[in-house]
Every structure is written in C-alpha cells, then in structure tokens.
C-alpha cells in the first residue's frame, strides 16, 4: 500500500505518532498479518487509550487470532468510549455468536441496528444467531429485513433459505437459493442450501445435482460432500454415500457429524463393527453428540450386544432426552435384558410424552408397554409425521386397471426363515391363480433355505428389492399396476413405510406382521377379527377395519412336527415337576406378569418355568428377579434355539401349560403352541397386540382359557396345575379341535382373505373410498 512508507517515515521522525501506528496496524490486518496488526495497534493505544476506533480494530485482530474473549473486551472498551458505535456492536455480536453466547449476540446486533437502521449485514448475521437459537421464524424475518435493505444481497438470500428449510417452507427456500444463484452463479453455499431444501421435498435427484454443483464450484466444500452423502443414503446408494462421507472427513477430520453419518451408512451396509468405530470417532470429537450415542446403541442392539446398547442409549438420554423415539427404544433395550429398574416410571414418562404430542417411542416399542389403543394411535401418527409423511404427489392418481386377475403384492422384510413366513406360506401357495396374481417384494436378503425356496415358488413374481430405494420400490409397484399392496411389516424390523407413503397402489393394506394401527391416511385397511379389534375401538385405528370371520391370523396346516419327542433331560428339564412355559421374546415379559408367575411357582411344589433363551443377560436378570421373589433361580429353565421348527414344535409336548404375557401376547408363538397341542392361558388386554392369543383360542374352540384379569388368570393357572384331569381335558379338546375348528384350516382362511381382497378391489374400481366391512363366512 502506498500509505505504508509514509506512515513509517512519520514514525521514524515521531515514534509516538498515534495515527501512524494505528493505521499501520490496520494495513497489517488487511494483509492478514494479525499478530503484527495487534502489536502496532497496542503500541498506538499505549500512546492514547481513548480512541474507540482503535479498540474496535484491535478487537478485529484479536478475533482473527482466535482470542475471542479478549476481542469482546476490546469491543466493550470501544463502546464504552463511543456508545453510539454501531460497527463495534456489530463486530461484538459476531464474536459473541462464535462463542455461542447467542442471546448476547442478538442483543448486540439489535443495538447496532437501532443505531444504524439500514445495517443490512447486522440483520443478516442476527438471522444466523436466531437460527442457532432455533428461533427460525424470527431468523427468516431478520433475513427479510436484510434483503429489503439490499435486494441483491446473495448471502442473505441463501441464509434465508436455510431458515426457511428449518420452518418447512421448502419451496420458498429453493426459490430463495435460486435468487442468490442468479445474483452469484459461483456461490457454492447457495447450491448447497438449495440441495438441503430439495432433499426435504424428496426431490432427491435434483438435490444430488445441486450438491454436485456446489462441489464443482468449491472442491473442498466438506459440508456439501456430507449433505450429498445424506441424499445418497436416502436413495439407498450406501456405498456411494460412504465414499462421500469419507471425502468429508478427509477434508475436515474433525467433522463429527460426518463420522456420525458415516456410521449410519456402514450400519446399512451391515459393517456394524466399523459403524460402531465411526460413532466412537464422532463421540470423541463431540462428547455431547447424543445422536451418535443413540445410533451406536442401535448398532449394538443389532449385534445383540444388549448391555452395551442399554449403556449407549442411557448416555444419549442423559445428554438429550428429547430426541425422538429415544426414551422408547432405551426402555425396549432394557426390556430385552429384563432390566426392570424404574420400569413403571419409564412407562409413565412415555405415556405423558405421548399425551403432550412428543414422539418419545417407536410404535413397535410401545406395544409391549402398558398402553391403550388411543396411545398407540397417537404414537403411530407422531412417527408417521416425523419419518414418513404422505408424498404431496402420489404415484397412483385414480387410474383403473383392467387386469384379468387381481394383482396382490406382498411387501415384506420377512419372506425368509421368519415367523411371518411360517404362518403365511400355506396362504401364498393356496391363492386362487385364476382370480389372483400374487407378487412378492422382499426387502431383506435371505440365506438359501427350504423356506425361501418354498416362498419363491409360491408367487408369480418374486422381486428382491433390498438395494432399491423407497422411491424405486414405489415406482416398481406403480409400474407393475399392482391393485392391492399389502404391508406385511407395519412398523417391525425392516419395514419400509416410505414406500406406502408414495401411494403406489389403489388399495393399501396393513396385514399380519404388525399388531396395531399404522396411523397413516395412506393405509386403507387393517385385517382383523372382532376379538382383536372390538367395534368400540374403531376410533383408535387410522385404517378401516376388515373383519375376517374366525381370526385375523393365518396358519399353515402343512407344518411338520417331529415324530420324536426329546426326553426332559435332553431338553434341560428335571425328570419331574409341573412345567409352566412361555417361549415369548424376553422383552414381552413385564414385572407384574413375572410376579404372578413366581407366585405360581411358590404355590405349586416342584414346578418350574421353561423360557426361551433369548440372551444371557435376560436369563441372569430373570433368575435374579426370581430370587428376589423367593424362588430359587434354578427353577427357571432356559431352552436353547433348535435348528428346525419341527423340532421346536415337538419339544412343546414336554410342557404342561403355556403362560402368556399381557401387553404383547404370544402371536406366532401361541400359534405354534396350539399347533403342537399345548394349551395357552391368556389374559385379554385392551390393544390388538394384547388380544391376539385370545383370538387364536376362540378360533380353536378354547375360549375358556381367555381370562379378563390377571387375578382370574392366576386363579385359572393354579386350578389347571392342581387338577390334572381338568388340564388333560383341555389337551384332549385341543387335539380334537385342531383338525375341526377354523384356526388351522388354511384353505378356509385363504378363501376368506381373498373375499376381503375382492371387496376392497371392487370398491376401488367403483371409485368408492375404503369402508369397514365384514367377510361372510364360508358355509
């Protein structure tokens, strides 16, 4: 700069010349020589400490040297000397914002604006502080003020887009970015923010293109690579997403969110150990990263490292208890290992949160907790609003298909060795091919097995859609002109509600896999019976109810039972003693039911409780809980998994009575027990999930084993255990009814379900909305 030699000449003659020292410092600052700038300005201030502009410029140098607290003090000194110094208030606001003293930053910007109403930059940066405070509507208003003052203010336009995205005004956000880009076509940040809004609009291909443009303009734009990875993840292009996250962390090794997102991609690629390591890295960089603890807990849960999962979820709860679904999944993980510490309190918290409209639990986790049909509907609606709201432009627009056969597509992650497949395989095989064209869309891979091969042979088409995005699957269903799309998952593991949210089919049905409402306007029907969904409960279901005549649950009467019954010794049971059993998952066991079971063991000498070995921690905790209730831990016997379902069915002959759980009954497990000849004792609850065993008992002619309260349940269990003749009579009745009652009549069931499908299809063909109806029983 031409002025620099003049200032130095003056200083040679007058070393204490304030203006030359100060302005020389300003020149060094403009060059980016911040330490030298600070030295020169400090020298000037020793000569005259009462010049406000020098303190302001000193603050700027300190800010760029990272000495933020000292910078604030310098701006404060400038303001003390010149109370109407708008620029000092503005600069002070910027540093306070960097220090995350956001309320103070806003106040400082407000003061700058009050002193200088046309201060567009102050409005813009004030918007940034308000956005960080999550006061997004106020942030938008602040950006609007900046733009009103300076219509060509590109930075304010793309920042406004960010705030608009936060308040879900996505179309406006895209438009705001487009304005910024029109002003500055090289503004990479605007393309990045535009991608964020497009992603929320689920215009994923456009979002991807926008991020690509941001990266082309700014190849070291770490956030754009991270955001690009998020869209690729949504498109289920997980390998590409992982590469994008890898680039992010290479560019910015301390990008905690990129390590977090990388963990998600690795989890989806089933590289769970690597995913956990990536979450660990995110946590190391950001110890309060509650979401990383949450997702790490889920990876541990998938790996069956249940104690680690509980601990990781607990840390997330401690850091950020209001993360959606966190409290519910933490409780669910504890229930898997039968850790009942604060159980009643935890359940109460979930109920209170739901009443307040907080999405504190996934719907599936709520099924095993004390809850009402109204609670479960509220939970499902909150989940849908958060994770899979209906698409604004559905894929099916009211077209009528002219097929010779009704095309029914079953979409599921369970078309493999899974209880749903064991129940429904006979149904799939028995579909009337003259009237129906069954299609399978499988969401999960399966190792080769007789069941998988049997299922593949059961459908006209069997489509492996594991690697397809929700959009691609929905488009496939639409392109196939599916008449009825059946969701066999609901909210269970591997579910893809995002497919159904796009409304790819004229009729969409919630069936078999999930015992409750899906809370969705885009799910038309739920298949039920009058026991699991009494008419008084209709208001608690988003779907219309389809009542099958006998039971909603299909059963395959072709299932084999091994002819060989293992000895009690082989099964790990003592040689004598009454065997109560429950092969339900451990998370279904709740303290009140376990209390009852232990009272039974205390009252029936030599009796034992035979349970499924789901995990070692659950076994240890249950034995510990038994000891607390005065029952020796060895009276709980845990059955290992067996290789073949027919062997499991055969060993059920060793048990005397199946004791059901309350809030989440035995479902496929109760079906197994009854098929194997073992009476099931249940207590009916208020929800679908708590009434399933009762539905099965009614359909097999054993309604006497359905009780209306836990007191009655306990009394009947005692009576059956003490009266061998009575129990034998029930076993004999079950043996007779198994082949004569509807529960295991797969052919009859198939005709009833096909009748239901026909009615649904006919209504859709006539352009009529879904309606609750009952299927007329076959004579």
Image (spheres, grey):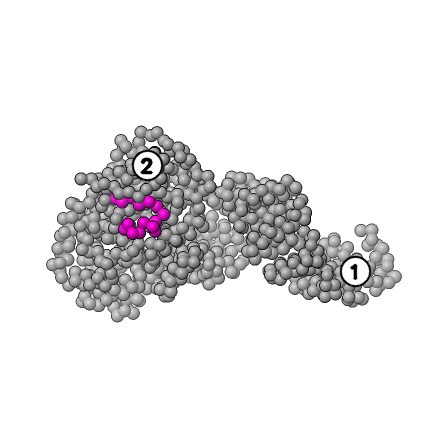
For mark 2, what is the residue? Answer: 763
Q: Tell me where residue 501 appears, x and y as whole percent.
A: 42, 43
Name of the residue lying farthest toward the right: 13
Q: Nearer the viewer, residue 194 or 609?
A: 194
Name of the residue lying farthest toward the left: 725
Instruction: Give the residue at x 31% y 61%.
Output: 590
**For numbered disc 1, what is the local secondary structure?**
helix
Q: Tell me where residue 377 appears, x and y as whole percent.
A: 37, 52
Q: Is residue 158 left or right of residue 605?
A: right
Whether the magenta-drawn stretch holds residue 320 is answered as no
Label 1 packing within 10 angstroms: few (<14), some (14-19), many (20+):
many
Instruction: Give the residue at x 35% y 39%.
Output: 769
Q: Nearer the viewer, residue 308 or 524?
A: 524
Q: Nearer the viewer, residue 147 or 337?
A: 147
Q: Where is the C terminus found, in terms of image quarters?
A: top left
Instruction: Give the residue at x 51% y 45%.
Output: 200
**Label 2 vs label 1, nearer the camera:** 2
Magenta segment: 534-548
Q: Tell me where residue 262 appears, x and y as whole percent.
A: 50, 50
| Dot placed on the residue nearer the N-terminal end, 2 or 1 | 1
Q: Is residue 473 visible?
A: no
Instruction: Give the residue at x 17% y 47%.
Output: 738
Task: Tell me which corner region of the image, top left, top right, bottom left or bottom right, holds residue 408.
Answer: top left
Q: Tell me where residue 109 appears, x and y as whole percent.
A: 65, 58
For mark 1, what is the residue? Answer: 22
Question: CB of mark 2 within 8 Å of CB of mark 1?
Answer: no
Q: Is residue 277 left or right of residue 613?
A: right
Q: Is residue 484 above or below residue 360?
A: above
Task: Tell me which corner region of the image, top left, top right, bottom left or bottom right, holds residue 42.
Answer: bottom right
Q: Is residue 449 above or below residue 674?
A: above
Marks 2 and 1 sit apart, C-alpha to C-alpha, by: 84 Å
């Amino acid at each position: 700069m031409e002025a620099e030699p003049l200032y130095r000449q003056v200083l040679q003659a007058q070393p204490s010349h304030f203006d030359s020292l100060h302005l020389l410092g300003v020149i060094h600052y403009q060059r980016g020589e911040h330490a030298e700038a600070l030295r020169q300005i400090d020298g000037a201030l020793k000569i005259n400490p009462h010049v406000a502009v020098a303190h302001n410029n000193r603050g700027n140098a300190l800010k760029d040297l990272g000495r933020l607290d000292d910078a604030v003090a310098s701006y404060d000194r400038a303001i003390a000397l010149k109370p109407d110094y708008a620029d000092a208030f503005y600069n002070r606001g910027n540093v306070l914002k960097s220090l995350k003293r956001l309320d103070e930053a806003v106040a400082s910007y407000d003061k700058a604006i009050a002193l200088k109403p046309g201060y567009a930059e102050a409005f813009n940066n004030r918007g940034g502080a308000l956005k960080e405070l999550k006061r997004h509507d106020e942030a938008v208003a602040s950006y609007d003020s900046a733009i009103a003052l300076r219509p060509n203010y590109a930075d304010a336009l793309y920042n406004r887009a960010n705030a608009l995205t936060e308040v879900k005004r996505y179309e406006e956000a895209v438009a705001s970015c487009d304005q910024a880009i029109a002003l500055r076509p090289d503004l990479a940040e605007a393309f990045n923010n535009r991608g964020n809004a497009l992603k929320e609009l689920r215009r994923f291909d456009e979002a991807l293109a926008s991020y690509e443009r941001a990266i082309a303009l700014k190849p070291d734009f770490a956030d754009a690579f991270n955001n690009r990875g998020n869209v690729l993840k949504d498109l289920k292009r997980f390998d590409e997403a992982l590469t994008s996250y890898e680039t992010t962390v290479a560019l910015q090794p301390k990008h905690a969110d990129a390590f977090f997102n990388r963990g998600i991609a690795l989890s989806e690629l089933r590289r769970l150990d690597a995913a956990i390591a990536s979450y660990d890295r995110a946590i190391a960089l950001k110890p309060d990263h509650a979401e990383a603890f949450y997702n790490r807990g889920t990876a541990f849960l998938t790996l069956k490292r249940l104690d680690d999962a509980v601990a990781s979820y607990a840390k997330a709860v401690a850091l950020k208890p209001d993360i959606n679904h966190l409290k519910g999944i933490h409780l669910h993980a504890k229930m898997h290992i039968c850790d009942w510490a604060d159980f009643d309190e935890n359940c109460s918290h979930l109920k209170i949160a739901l009443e307040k409209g907080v999405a504190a639990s996934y719907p599936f986790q709520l099924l095993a907790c004390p809850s009402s049909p109204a609670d479960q509907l509220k939970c499902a609606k909150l989940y849908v609003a958060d994770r899979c709201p209906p698409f604004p432009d559905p894929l099916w627009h009211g077209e009528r298909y002219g097929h010779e056969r009704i095309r029914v597509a079953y979409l599921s992650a369970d078309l493999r060795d899974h209880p749903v497949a064991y129940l429904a395989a006979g149904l799939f095989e028995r579909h009337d091919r003259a009237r129906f064209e069954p299609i399978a869309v499988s969401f999960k891979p399966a190792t080769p097995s007789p069941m998988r091969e049997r299922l593949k042979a059961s459908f006209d088409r069997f489509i492996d859609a594991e690697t397809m995005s929700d959009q691609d699957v929905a488009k496939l269903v639409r392109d196939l002109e599916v008449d009825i799309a059946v969701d066999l998952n609901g909210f269970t593991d591997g579910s893809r509600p995002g497919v159904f949210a796009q409304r790819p089919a004229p009729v969409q049905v919630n069936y078999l896999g999930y015992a409750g409402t899906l809370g969705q306007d885009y799910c038309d029907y739920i298949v039920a019976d009058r026991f699991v969904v009494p008419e008084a409960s209709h208001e608690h279901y988003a779907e219309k109810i389809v009542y099958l005549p006998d039971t909603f649950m299909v059963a395959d009467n072709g299932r084999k039972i091994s002819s060989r019954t293992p000895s009690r010794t082989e099964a790990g049971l003592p040689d004598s003693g009454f065997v109560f059993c429950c092969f339900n998952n451990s998370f279904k066991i709740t303290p009140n039911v376990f209390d009852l079971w232990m009272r039974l063991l205390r009252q029936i000498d030599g009796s034992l409780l035979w349970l499924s070995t789901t995990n070692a921690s659950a076994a240890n905790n249950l034995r510990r809980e038994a000891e607390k209730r005065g029952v020796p831990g060895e009276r709980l016997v845990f059955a290992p998994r067996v290789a073949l379902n027919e062997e499991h069915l055969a060993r059920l002959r060793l048990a005397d009575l199946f004791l059901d759980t309350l809030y989440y009954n035995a479902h496929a497990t109760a079906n197994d027990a009854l098929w194997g000849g073992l009476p099931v004792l249940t207590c009916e609850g208020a929800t679908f999930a708590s009434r399933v065993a009762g539905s099965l008992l009614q359909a097999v002619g054993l309604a006497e084993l359905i009780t209306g309260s836990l007191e009655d349940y306990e009394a009947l269990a005692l009576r059956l255990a003490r009266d061998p003749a009575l129990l034998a009579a029930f076993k004999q009745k079950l043996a007779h009814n198994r082949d004569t009652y509807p529960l295991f009549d797969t052919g009859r069931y198939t005709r009833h379900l096909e009748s239901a499908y026909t009615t649904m299809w006919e209504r859709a063909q006539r352009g009529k909305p879904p309606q609750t109806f009952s299927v007329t029983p076959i004579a």
